[in-house]
């Protein structure tokens, strides 16, 4: 009897947390429209997986970070730079490059990116 109650409680918890996870996955991120607009306007975010400032940049976008026009620059062993970034002349991370060729290095807030790119901040 106790075993059946425990199974029911576990099943209920799995359903609740599974539902919350599904809801989270289906809910758009706060900055989805901005991230998509940056991509459409040929803005590029160059970074490295090991870079704390790049991680901070992505955290500012929350779940919308997956939609950012991100280019990974680091080799897997962290000792080199991928050709796409060395050819582009990327020297530090994060670096934002805009369609007009202007570059800004460092963490930018969504508001700053909106102002730099002309993308609306919803």
Image (cartoon, helix red, strand yellow):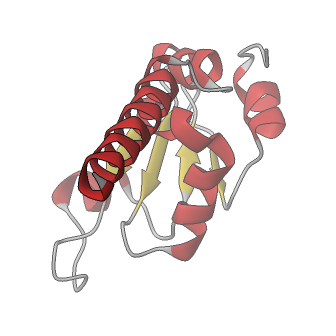
Taking the spot 38% from the left edge, 66% from the top edge, the residue there is 48
Residue 119 screen position, x and y as percent: 71, 16
Q: Nearer the viewer, residue 118 or 25?
A: 25
- In the rendered image, which quarter is residue 95 located in? bottom right
Taking the spot 79% from the left edge, 14% from the top edge, the residue there is 122
Residue 50 screen position, x and y as percent: 39, 75
How many tags in the picture? Answer: 0
Q: Nearer the viewer, residue 67 or 6?
A: 6
Using residue 4 as the reference point, say whether residue 76 is left or right of it: left
Residue 91 visible to the viewer: yes
- In the rendered image, which quarter is residue 120 located in? top right
Taking the spot 60% from the left edge, 43% from the top edge, the residue there is 62
Residue 87 screen position, x and y as percent: 26, 54
Relative to 54, say whether 66 is above or below.
above
Residue 10 screen position, x and y as percent: 34, 48
Taking the spot 40% from the left edge, 25% from the top edge, the residue there is 22
Relative to 56, say whether 38 is above or below.
above
Q: Nearer the viewer, residue 42 or 60?
A: 60
Residue 69 visible to the viewer: no
Using residue 31 as the reference point, say whether residue 84 is left or right of it: left
Using residue 83 as the reference point, say whether residue 15 is left or right of it: right
């Amino acid at each position: 009897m106790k075993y059946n109650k425990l199974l029911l409680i576990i099943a209920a918890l799995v359903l609740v947390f599974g539902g919350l996870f599904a809801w989270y996955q289906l809910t758009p991120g706060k900055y989805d429209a901005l991230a998509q607009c940056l991509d459409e306007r040929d803005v590029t975010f160059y970074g490295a997986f090991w870079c704390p400032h790049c991680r901070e940049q992505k955290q500012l976008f929350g779940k919308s970070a997956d939609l950012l026009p991100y280019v990974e620059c680091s080799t897997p062993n962290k000792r080199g730079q991928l050709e796409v970034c060395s050819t582009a002349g990327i020297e530090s991370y994060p670096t934002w490059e805009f369609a007009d060729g202007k570059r800004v290095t460092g963490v930018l807030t969504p508001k700053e990116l909106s102002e730099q790119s002309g993308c609306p901040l919803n």
